[in-house]
Image: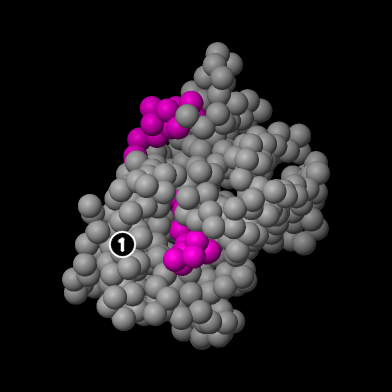
Amino acid sequence: MHTQSATTGSAEDGEFYFMSSHRSLKAGGVHARIHTPARGALDPDSAFSREVAEAFARARADGIASPVLMGAIPFDIDQPSELFIPVRHAFFDRQERLQAAAQRAGDGGKVVGSRSIPDEQGFKAAVSQAIERFGRGEIRKAVLSRVLEVDFDRPVSAERVFDAVCAQNPNGYQFQLPLADGGRLVGVSPELLLQKEGARVRTFPLAGSAKRQSDPAADAAASAKLLDSSKDHYEHSLVIDDIQNVLVPYCAELSIPSAPSLLGTRAMWHLGSQIDGVLADAALPILQLACRLHPTPAICGFPTQASRQLIREIEPFERGVFSGIVGWCDEHGNGEWAVTIRCATVADTRVRLFAGAGIVAASTPESEWAETQAKLGTMLGAFGLSGQEAAA
């Protein structure tokens, strides 16, 4: 068993959040951590599932009313989980937190160094390698990513970063959560993996992207071009087909739009499809179904196992919590989990930012590098930086 009781530490101090338009959760303290990999979430009798149930029971026995499980599950669910049961929590109206954030966001310090892993040349070479593999194998899509490490001249406040994230991005799924290594995971994801309330489930996958433009006419043209892009529609269809195949066996009803719609964030346009369903078994826990969906082709590729192997071969870093899932659930199996994108880990003077791009046969290395640059803009903005400043 990998459950650990809380010990006093900086990562466990302060307030933790997962916020959405559906429900927003504020928490504090760490009653217990669960590090066991979530692969076992698919099996209700697994060590992971038993551990979660026992952690809930201990929390109740210790006087925590209606305990919840919060945190993050990595991209690779065979890797250790970053889950915890908070000492205290409450649901609240996130507008209050968004208004407070707008008043508190401040200076993030001076950049003293940065590096991209891989660098531009390495990322473009990886894209070319993936495209070449498509021509001689079963892989039809692979999501390649990179990490941008930025060093500051003084310790970075995760709370200040979260304030800036909320102030600049009032929509989506905002989160600030403690990590076992003492750092914090902070971000605002546009992508819902799964929401469950009783028998009703919802997912809102995104695939196909374009950078927002400051000029309104150019921005409208960018969104129209995305909506008309056969390359992006193909990429999106791979995601929808895979999610449909996963959900159909569990659902008595499933509603999938015939075509994607546009979703706009501060930095990006996306193609998205809201999928709603009614479970045949309302008691099916959200975490079990979420780990059945994860990783979707939106952040891994298609087919899943082959694209994951390609990622292992050509990405020069371990993703960890990046492109995993982040959120919460209760004892009754309800909750909400978002895809862990548009995010950063904050640890002392160093932050690590993540961005990925979906590669298909029609992709070009230059456009995919530009897409990662655009996606990094969300979190760079929370530090008051542009891409050029971070690369200085």
Against 250, residue 331 (above or below) is below
Residue 184's x, y, as percent?
A: 34, 65
**Magenta span has 311?**
yes
Q: Residue 276: in sight, yes or no?
A: yes
153 left or right, relative to 311: left
Residue 164's x, y, as percent?
A: 49, 73
Against 221, residue 186 (above or below) is below
Q: Quadrant of residue 318?
A: top left
Residue drawn where x is 51% and y is 38% of the image: 300
Give the color scheme: rainbow, by chain, secondary structure or one colour: one colour
Q: Dot 1: few (<14), some (14–19), or many (≥20) neighbours within 10 Å?
A: few
Residue drawn where x is 55% and y is 29% of the image: 303
User: Which residue position is annotated with label 1?
Assistant: 54
Q: Residue 384: in sight, yes or no?
A: no
Residue drawn where x is 79% and y is 55% of the image: 220
For the magenta stretch, what is the residue range?
306-335
Q: Most extreme residue toward the top, as rendered?
A: 136
Q: Quadrant of residue 258?
A: top right
Tell how many labels: 1
Residue drawn where x is 47% and y is 41% of the image: 145
227 left or right, relative to 103: right
Of residues 87 and 378, the one drawn nearer to the viewer in this rendering: 87
Of residues 72 and 316, the one drawn nearer to the viewer in this rendering: 72
Q: Quadrant of residue 263?
A: bottom right
Residue type at mark 1? Glu
Q: SS at mark 1?
A: helix
111 left or right, relative to 230: left
**Magenta span has 328?**
yes
Quadrant location, the C terminus: bottom left
383 left or right, relative to 4: right
Residue 277's x, y, as percent?
A: 69, 53
Residue 148's x, y, as percent?
A: 40, 50
